Structures are given as structure tokens and as C-alpha cells.
Amino acid sequence: MRENSTSGAAVGFLLHLIDSGAAERIRRRIGLPEPDRERTPEARRNADLWSWTRTPVPTSVLLWSLQEDDPDLNQWVWRHISADNGMRRAIARGVPFGPDREGPLTVPDSVRLADEPPVPESFTRFGLVGALREGTSMQSARTAASMVLKRSDWQAVMEADQDRPLPGYARWALSVRPDCPPELRAQFGTHRKFTHRIEQAGVLGDPADYATTWSAASHVLKVLSTGHLMFPARVAEAEDALRPLVREHLADHEDAWSVLAQLIDTFHGNAVELVVTAGAVA
């Protein structure tokens, strides 16, 4: 098992949740090497970030990164294969996502306004709300929804929908935006099928929800292993959700960790199920 492999990073994230001395002993026992000391910390960081941009993730994970309001992190979100036009447009325009930030952000040097996705013709002709009302297909609605950027835009959309409900395509395209305000999403609908579709689109409640319910475990834990780089303000929520389970079912038992390392590559359940299963088998 390589330290920078998916399974190596996943197991390493869980080991981080127990006592450091026990973690080091178990790391040696299961053959998980330490990070490559021949590379500089900056080189290791850049390698981790580049790997992260090639890893599909729920869109909410990218939102947690954007909420850091860090231009350096934003350039990596821009490159991410899961980033959509709305996110890239916001990055190119310096739109903040943190709850307490008002002013514009510095745009990363690697991102230019000219790189922004094209402004839809319907927006130029009809304005924001008009473009959303003109959306007669999912594609055109998604394109119009990519122009909803600032808090004032979301407020305008909410008021327009209250005045006269937006078309179904527009509601759906806005709802699957991870930064859609919860009160607007609730205004659009609370039916169980609607909620299920939102979850399928990768909109999650918080990192704890991602850590405990999303599958497959190895993939989720690999993403969380880069959380200290990409969403440091929120990764603790995932750690806090998993720590009691890890300490209860794995603790410092070498056999349990060995079973987990053997299971993790082919395990299809979530991280909670993985931890419980490894502990039970051992």
C-alpha cells in the first residue's frame, strides 16, 4: 500500500483520529509508509492538490473550498473536473462565498476574466430573472442559473419566485447549485423525491454528512485526507463525526486495522460501515 494511493490516503486519514503513538505503530504494522521525505513540503502539497483536481467529488465539497475565500485555493477549484460554470464564473469575478465576507476577492493570476464561461444570450436580452423564466430545457436553465452569483442575485431570484413561481427547469437548475440558500431550496419544494434528487446531484448538508453517508468509503476518505489543504475550516466536522466510531471499533487494535486495510479497496459501503465491519471481522 502506497501512502499517496487512494487506499493509503484513506487509511491515513482514519489513523489521524487515534493517538499518534498508536497510529505510528499500526502504520508500520500494515505497511503504510510515511510521506516521501525526499520531496519538499511544497512539492508534496502541489502533488496532492493536482491529484485532488482529478478526483470527482460532490459539488458541496467544492463549495466548502470556495468558502475559504482563498484565491490560491480558488485556482485549484477552477481546475477541478467537478467545477461547473457557475463556480468558474464566480472565481473569475472574485465573488466571495464565506458567510462573513462582503468585498471582492483577488482573482488568481492563473484565472483571467477572459477565461470566464460565455455569458448566455438570454441573460443579455432578458436579464437574470428573465433568462431563468426563458429556460425551456434543462441545458438552457443551467446556463441561466450560472449567472446567479452574489447574495443579491439569490435574493432577487427568491423574490421573483415568490411573486410568480419560476419554471420547473429553472427551479431544478438552481436547487442543484450547492450554494443555493436553504430557504430558497425549501421554497422550491420539500417533497421526498425532490430531496433525493438534490442529494444525487451532490448537494450535502455538511462534511459530517459526507463522511458518514457517502460511498464508497475509500474515495470519500481520500477526499477528506486533503481537507486540511482544501477546506481546513470545515474538515474538523468530518473528523468529529468519525472519531468516536474509529476509537470504539478500531482503537489501537492492530488486527482490526489490518482487516480494514485489506477491505478498503473493494468495500462499497460508506466509511461508518467500513469501520464497523473491520472491527467486527477482527
Image: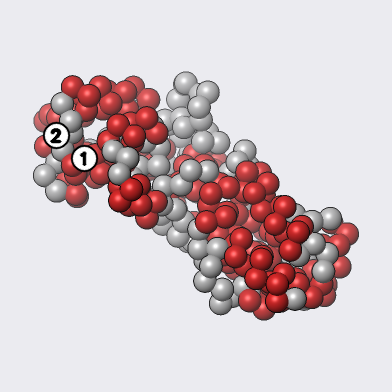
Q: For this view, does 238 lie left or right of residue 143? A: right
Identify the amino acid type marked 2: Arg
Which percent across, then down, holds residue 143? 23, 43
Cα–Cα span, label 2 and label 1 = 7 Å
Label disc, if present, on residue 215 of the rendered structure? none
Q: Quadrant of residue 174?
A: top left
Query: Sequence-wise, which precedes: disc 2 or disc 1?
Result: 2
Q: Report the residue marked by disc 2.
A: 133
Quarter the C terminus occupies = bottom right
For disc 1, the neighbor class at 10 Å (few under 14, some 14 to 19, many from 20) is many
Q: For this view, does 209 lie left or right of residue 260? A: left
Q: Residue at 60%, 65% (x, y): give it.
A: 273
Which percent across, then down, holds residue 136? 11, 44
Which percent across, then down, holds residue 69? 52, 33
Q: Residue at 82%, 69% (x, y): give it.
A: 253
- Can the viewer see residue 143 in this picture? no
Quick one: SS at disc 1?
helix
**Which one is nearer the viewer's eye here, 276 or 79?**
276
Number of disc labels: 2
Q: Residue at 58%, 47% (x, y): give it.
A: 208
For disc 2, the neighbor class at 10 Å (few under 14, some 14 to 19, many from 20) is many
Q: Residue at 30%, 31% (x, y): give it.
A: 187
Identify the amino acid type marked 1: Ala
Image vertical order of residue 22 relative to residue 181, above or below: below
Quick one: SS at disc 2?
helix
Quarter the N terminus occupies = bottom right
Q: For this view, does 69 lie left or right of residue 248? A: left
- Can the viewer see residue 68 in this picture? yes
Q: Quadrant of residue 246?
A: bottom right
Which percent across, then down, holds residue 142? 24, 45
Q: Report the residue marked by disc 1.
A: 170
> Are the two marked residues, 2 and 1, in contact with CB atoms closer than 8 angstroms?
yes
